[in-house]
Image (cartoon, rainbow, N blue to C red):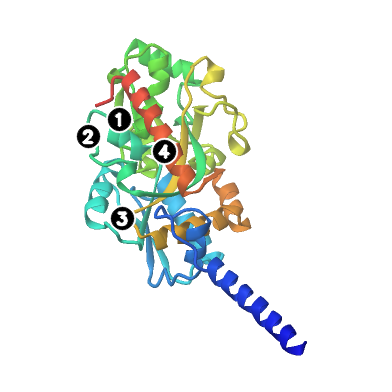
Amino acid sequence: MKKRWACSLLSAALLLTLTACGQGNPQTNGGGTGTSTSTAAHHSSYPEKPLVVVAPSGAGGGWDKTARSLAKVLVENKQIDQPVTVENKPGGGGVVFLSEYVTKDKGNDYRLFVNSPPLLINHRKKEGNSPFGYEDVTPLAQLTKDFGAIVVPADSPYENLKQLLEELKADPAKLTMAGGSAPGSMDHLIAVLPAAKYGIDPKAVKYVSYDGGGEAMAALLGGNADAIATDASSLGEYLKAGRIRVLGVSSDQRLGGHLADIPTFKEQGIDASFTIWRGVFGPPEMSAEAVAFWDKTLEQLAASDSWQAELQRNAWESEYRNATEFKTFLAEQDRQINELLQSLGMAK
């Protein structure tokens, strides 16, 4: 009897051991997402050395702020025990950096970058386009969404968007519009989209590009531009200081905080809207191990109190998508961007 009981206990223990072993050896799916690769990432030694997050622009713009907030929260949350530095790589609204990144950083798991619609726009536009798009890199996660704004100096004669558009309609060459991205890229689209909807030839609008929103704002305040198109979230300090006037925002509904009193384009009779998503990307041929790590880590970051505080501080709206969801979203955005560029006569 004792022998039979001992054998039963031995059999049960063996069964439990085999089951646990089977559960602890998940199969990876090759795409770097899902439960199986997240479990694999738990046992991974990645990352084993310092990481770099690149903002493909100058200081002060949306990419720069996103990269620095990301690096700050990763360290604050102790989600990573390696140093994380931010590099600014301005040039061509991100085109110069992307070309170098795709060709020289293939498989470099330790060099990430942040981006937004210009990744799609630069690939689809006619002039000064990039041979590379979102399919040439590794989308890791969308973190935020923002909106565009048309901004003039506080002492500008233009009190609302329609007044500015009427002036442009009478003489498109009279005013200088500026932005922190190359012609045909995001700020340019935000600048000319209301004009196109108002019956103005977008190609006739005089647009001057700068390497980042900070430089575009400096041009506006220095008297080198009549108006700029930029990220709505970057305007808080200038509004509080009374240095600018915001004529309209590209959201479907009014925003909160310091922009609560600013009307949308649509409120002013201009049937136009534009959402600025921001996300994190890795290099082509990024390892499944690294993709799984970031899929898990960025999801945790997006839900953390530290990240929520960064969202509030920067007037960003949270919109998290994991790697798989982000790829699907980018495919749809790519189609919409191409249609928009075609309607403006800017598609290649």
Q: Earlier in the sequence, mark 3 or mark 2?
A: 2
Please state which amino acid type lies under the numbered disc 2. Answer: Gly
Which residue: 62% across, 32% down?
260
Disc 1 versus disc 4: distance between alpha carbons?
A: 19 Å
Q: Position of residue 79 (x, y in %)?
A: 53, 66
| Residue assigned mark 3 | 285
> Is residue 164 placed above or below 46 in the rendered structure?
above
- Judging by the rendered image, the residue that carries numbered circle 4 is 330
Kind of element beneath mark 1: loop
Report the mark closest to the observer, 3 or 2.
3
- Measured along the vertical axis of the image, is residue 310 above or below residue 336? below
* Residue hosting label 2: 128
Kind of residue at disc 4: Leu
- 2 and 1 marks in contact (CB < 8 Å): yes
At mark 3, the secondary structure is loop
Question: What distance separates the C-alpha of mark 3 from that of mark 2?
Answer: 26 Å
| Closer-to-camera residue (222/16) | 16
Residue at mark 1: 184
